[in-house]
Image (cartoon, rainbow, N blue to C red):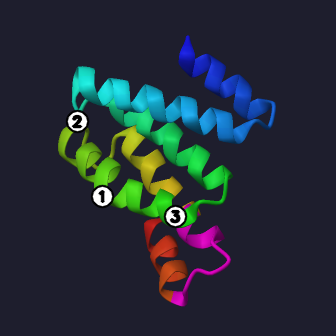
Amino acid sequence: VQHHIAVCLMQLGRDDEALVLTRMIHASFVSIFGVSNEETICAGLHVSTSLIKLERWDEAKSFLRDQLLPAAGRSLGADHHATLCLKTNLARALATNPTGTRDDLLEAETIM
């Protein structure tokens, strides 16, 4: 139910509120299921999407690199849909950051 509320908030343009809710959902999933659970990883995907939408590229990059992608790679595998979505979000965070470097763009291209 909370996830649907977060999606509605995003669709209404209330992105800050959506981020707060998606973070709460992700944190509760981590405590209940652990970091490597598919539902937890998908909840983290929503957090990263919210961060990118709010143009918090550095936060999105570190969240994806440090927490989500390692857990997804270990538990779901490199070819799982959720892992691929996480990689896409990392590429988006790298490529759309106006202060990003040439190396960021090259990394984004490599990911895609």
Which residue is the site of mark 2?
36
Residue type at numbered disc 1: Asp
Q: Determine crowd level at label 3: few under 14, some 14-19, many 20+ residues with C-alpha closer than 10 A.
A: many
Residue type at numbered disc 3: Ala
Does the CB distance between marks 1 and 2 fall below 8 Å?
no
29 left or right of 57 in image: left
CA gap, disc 1 and disc 3:
15 Å
- Magenta residues, as a range? 93-102
Q: Determine crowd level at label 1: few under 14, some 14-19, many 20+ residues with C-alpha closer than 10 A.
A: few
In the image, is residue 83 above or below residue 21? below
CA gap, disc 2 and disc 3:
22 Å
Res. 39 visible in picture: no
Where residue 90 sits in the image (x, y, percent)?
48, 60
Which residue is the site of mark 1?
66
Where residue 44 sits in the image (x, y, percent)?
42, 39
In the image, is residue 96 above or below residue 70? below
| Secondary structure of the residue carrying numbered label 2 | loop
Q: Which mark is residue 91?
A: 3
Q: Answer with mark 1 or mark 3, whichever residue precedes in sequence.
A: 1
| Secondary structure of the residue carrying numbered label 1 | helix
CA gap, disc 1 and disc 2:
13 Å
Where residue 88 sits in the image (x, y, percent)?
51, 55
For the residues carrying marks 1 and 3, which lies nearer the camera in this image? 1
| Residue found at x 77% / y 31% | 11
Q: Residue furthest top?
A: 1
Q: Answer with mark 2 or mark 3, whichever residue precedes in sequence.
A: 2
Q: Does the magenta portion include 97?
A: yes
62 left or right of 98 in image: left
Q: Does the magenta portion include 89?
A: no
Image quarter (top left, top right, bottom left or bottom right) of the N terminus: top right
Which residue occupies the foreground of this view, 9 or 105? Answer: 9
